[in-house]
Image (spheres, helix red, strand yellow):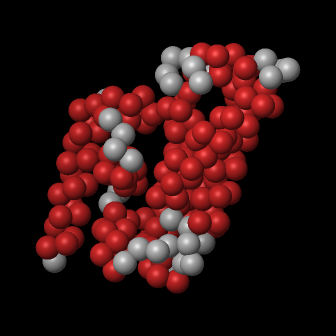
Amino acid sequence: MEEALLVERLKNNSTQELAFKDLVQTHKERLYWHIRKIVINHDDADDVLQNTFLKVFKSIANFKGESKIFSWMYRIATNEAINFLNTKARMVNTSPEMLQMKRVEQLEDDPYFDGDELQIRLQKAIALLPQKQQIVFNMRYFDEVKYEEMSEILETSVGALKASYHHARKKIEKYFEE
């Protein structure tokens, strides 16, 4: 469906509900996996996804169309996931990075994770990265998001994103060499 038409339907009270269902159906899986890579836990990813769509629904009137609607939603999902992790870390009196490491260590017992030992090692290496590098690495490596689109989503320059990805990749390579 053409994006401009979808946005118009989302902003129109008489077509909003059906348009929003279409929007959720179209983007929920991709957004779920993006969020899941950030928060790691399935149940938390579901909660953050639900909060993301609530925020999208409440804020759709403010969408200006300066970016693609998916980029806008991706940014909301990213911010919601980061805020969720930061809040959760504060609640247990630890850093977001330590919380991430603990969550990765629990992956083997997660019934929703079907990765092997190599994938768990990769997740541990990613968890050791600073939060921004984690997000940039996940978006580029797993989701294959182009730097230009990532720049829109994260509101950061392409050069800074390339540098973050490069540093993240080098740190992960070093982790695997040890």
Say whether residue 79 is visible: no
The C terminus, quarter of image = bottom left
x, y (%) of residue 150? 38, 35
Say whether residue 68 is visible: yes
Residue pictured at 64% horizontal, 16% vertical: 5
x, y (%) of residue 41? 56, 67
Q: Nearer the viewer, residue 129 or 21?
A: 21
**In the image, is residue 60 above or below residue 92?**
above
Q: Is 37 placed left or right of 158 in the picture?
A: right
Q: Nearer the viewer, residue 60 or 12?
A: 12
**In the image, is residue 157 above or below residue 54?**
above
The image shows a total of numbered marks equal to 0
Q: Is 172 placed left or right of 67 in the picture?
A: left
x, y (%) of residue 176? 19, 72
Q: Quadrant of residue 43?
A: bottom right
Q: Quadrant of residue 73?
A: top right
Residue pictured at 36% horizontal, 40% vertical: 145
Q: Residue furthest bottom?
A: 109
x, y (%) of residue 161? 29, 39
Q: Residue furthest front?
A: 1
